[in-house]
Image (cartoon, rainbow, N blue to C red):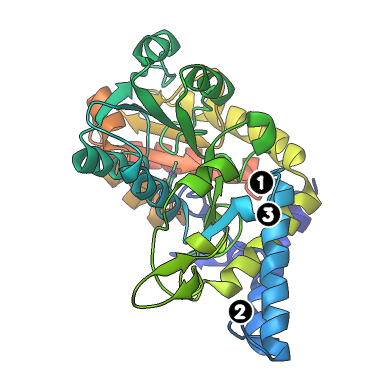
Amino acid sequence: MDIQKIRKDFPILSREVNGRPLVYLDNAATSQTPQQVIDSIVSYYHGYNANIHRGVHTLSQEATDAYEIAREKIQKHFNIAKSHEVIFTSGTTHSINLVANGFTSLLKEGDEILVSAMEHHSNIVPWQMLCERTGAVLKVIPMDHKGELEMDAFRALLSEQTRMVFCNHVSNALGTINPIEEIISAAHAVGAAVLIDGAQAAPHMKADLQELDVDFYTVSAHKMCGPTGVGILYGKEEWLTKLPPYQGGGEMIAEVTFEKTTYADLPHKFEAGTPNICGGIAFGTALDYLNEIGMEAIANYEDNLISYATEQLLAIEGLKIYGTADNKTSVISFNIEGIHPYDIGTILDKLGIAVRTGHHCAQPIMDFYKIPGTVRASFSFYNTEEEIDVLVEGVKKAKQMLA
Ligand SMILES: Cc1ncc(COP(=O)(O)O)c(CN[C@@H]2CONC2=O)c1O
């Protein structure tokens, strides 16, 4: 990987913040956008912006073709069997809510659904709302202080009453890569459906969804060098067929009369209204860009980066890392004894360094560690060891100023 050549693809990486070169280490929040994706957005609005799927004119056909080609690129990237198992959404939060809404008609009082202790709020709150609607019971798969799920406790929680299991592939707050193959297999053994939140995994590793045999998998384009406001829900056809539509409107219908409406086939049943046409097309371009570099090369490079960053940060006295799983990627959450993470983040920003501080929409994790939040540095393939050195020096300076 020619990092300097790659970095030139990202115009934003050459800007300054507070008079210093930007060091962007908040990739778990959103990734940056290469010129190729920016050009894809511009060329859509320059050349073939039109509404899709029903137009009789050339522009509409060009836009429709580009949008459906993007769907096929997503299908190929995640090794999905059928293109209609790819549902365009506005992102992971929308995708999870679509499934949670659909299960309202499939769950009954006393059914049990399991969620891991290290979830993002978007993979907790929709399921709590589902339990309120149905009388189902939410149970939590515990984690240990390393930030790894307690798999014996997970297996003990499974029963004939378990109907669903939800877990992130990678924790956005800890970087833990969860043993989803084992989770999927054990859940299927009791007949439970599994939704894996892939938001933090898909940017950093290949996810082969047929090999995983997962029932639902969610992805946000803005974490994968794509635009915000677009993502996908993958669902096995057998499950998507069982779920009722999420939103009513145009596109998702076959026939409408005031007496009765029949719904469109997959994927359109779940794609009501005018979608983020340009976003979907640009998501396809982002996948082209990532695959040009290669997901394996990206994963290997980022593994080396996080090992270097961990080693350098741990050399700072009083610094504690949260999330020390044997198998982790792309995220380092840390605090310095006696200093509030927000204060560290503020000083780092003055030095041009962008990190995230707070609970990272994972308050149960912070409660588990009994901390208000962390400083989270999150890496991508366009970051460098030199940028990590700037981060480390910045943390040392913040410690000196605040201790
Ligand atoms: C694991 C995980 N699941 C779901 C989401 C929600 O994704 P959307 O916002 O695209 O629907 C995020 C977002 N990550 C947050 C966003 O900012 N910082 C984070 O860690 C996430 O990291």
**Mark on residue 83?**
3
Q: Quadrant of the C terminus?
A: top left
Q: Identify residue type, mark 3.
A: Ser
Most foreground residue, 378 or 396: 378
Residue 361 in sight here: no
Residue positioned 40% across, 13% down in the render:
150
Q: Identify residue type, mark 2.
A: Ile
- Mark 1 sits on what residue? 381
Q: Identify residue type, mark 1.
A: Phe
Residue 145 image position (x, y, % from top left):
36, 16
Above or below, 361 against 43 in this view is above
Badge 3 marks a residue whose secondary structure is: helix
Of marks 3 and 1, the one in the foreground:
3
Above or below, 288 against 331 in this view is below
Q: CA distance from mark 2 to mark 3?
A: 17 Å
- Mark 2 sits on what residue? 52
Cβ at disc 3 under 8 Å from ligand 1: no
Q: Quadrant of the N terminus?
A: top right
Q: Residue furthest front?
A: 259
Residue 85 image position (x, y, % from top left):
61, 50
Q: CA distance from mark 3 to mark 1?
A: 29 Å
